[in-house]
Structure formats: structure tokens, C-alpha cells
Image (spheres, rainbow, N blue to C red):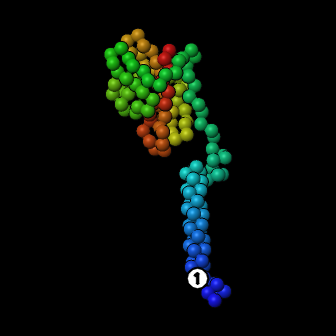
Amino acid sequence: MDQSRPRLGSAFEWAVAAAFLLATAAVAWLIITEMRAVRAPAMPRQERESAPAPEPAAPPAGAISVPVLILLDGTEIRVGDTLRKVTDRLGAGTPVEGGAGKSRFGERLTRAFEKGSTRFVLVFEPFERNGEPRVTAIYLR
């Protein structure tokens, strides 16, 4: 007689399985939503489409791009160093004609330096909105 009556344990197992399936779907939805939010730019679509594209930093003619510059006196300049750190080590440098411009997050500065017999150009841009300018490119002449 027990066989004709439905078992309550089986219904409970199906309910638990359905709850786990719904929880998995909810977590997947949260992950996808978060990924979309991270990829989306901060400005609205209309502003993105009307905003001018940032100009690329034009290297000087015949220059070689390097990620790290080690001078003869042991001074190191690396991509990512702040403008303040570089000016403390090397001075202000000479502004390069046509080197200033707009970048994605602010003003671009291009400075020429000569230390001993080494001549080089550093390009500074902020890495974030209202951030301090940092070295984005090092060009040896």
C-alpha cells in the first residue's frame, strides 16, 4: 500500500534542486551585470560619440621607444613615473614644439631632456581623470 502513495521526500529533493538552479542563475546574472558595468565608459553614449578621439603621442623622427631609461649616473626613468618625480630628478626639461595636446584623461605634455650625452623625450599624460601626469612614453634620440 505504501507504493501507491507519492513520497514526500522526492518532492522535497526536486524543490531543493530547483532552488539551487535558481540561485545559480541569479549569481550568473549578477556576474554578467557587473561585467557590463565595468566595461561601460563613465560618460553617456551621446557624449562618447561626439567627443573627439584623443591624439596619439607622435614620436620624434628617428626616435626609439623604450620602457625604462637608465642614465650614466644611475638615474632611472620608467613608464608610469610621475611628473613630480621626474622633475625632482632631472629638472623641468624643455617643452617640445607641438608636443602639448589633449589625451583621454587630460592634458598631454612632451618634454625634451639632455643628461650628459643622452638626449631623450618624455611624454606625460594622466592615467585617470584628474590624476597626476605620468610618463607614458620614453623616446631616445
The total of numbered circles placed on residues is 1
Of residue 75 and residue 10, the one placed in the foreground of this image is 10
Binning the other alpha carbons within 10 Å of mark 1 as few (below 14), some (14 to 19) or many (20 upward) gives few
Q: List x then y, in percent, for residue 111.
A: 46, 24
- Residue lying at the far front of the rendered structure: 1
Q: List x then y, in percent, for residue 89.
A: 34, 25
Q: Residue at x 42, y 38 (%)?
A: 132
Q: From the viewer's perspective, is residue 23 above or below residue 125?
A: below
Quarter of the image for residue 5 reads bottom right
> Is label 1 in a helix, a strand or a loop?
helix
Q: Can see residue 56?
A: yes
- Residue lying at the far top of the rendered structure: 117
- The residue that disc 1 covers is 8
Of residue 1 and residue 11, the one placed in the foreground of this image is 1
Q: Quadrant of the N terminus?
A: bottom right
Residue type at mark 1 is: Leu
Of residue 9 and residue 107, the one placed in the foreground of this image is 9
Q: Residue at x 32, y 16 (%)?
A: 73
Q: Residue at x 55, y 19 (%)?
A: 60
Q: Horizontally, is 6 left or right of 130 in the view?
A: right
Q: Residue at x 55, y 32 (%)?
A: 101
Q: List x then y, in percent, for residue 121.
A: 48, 21
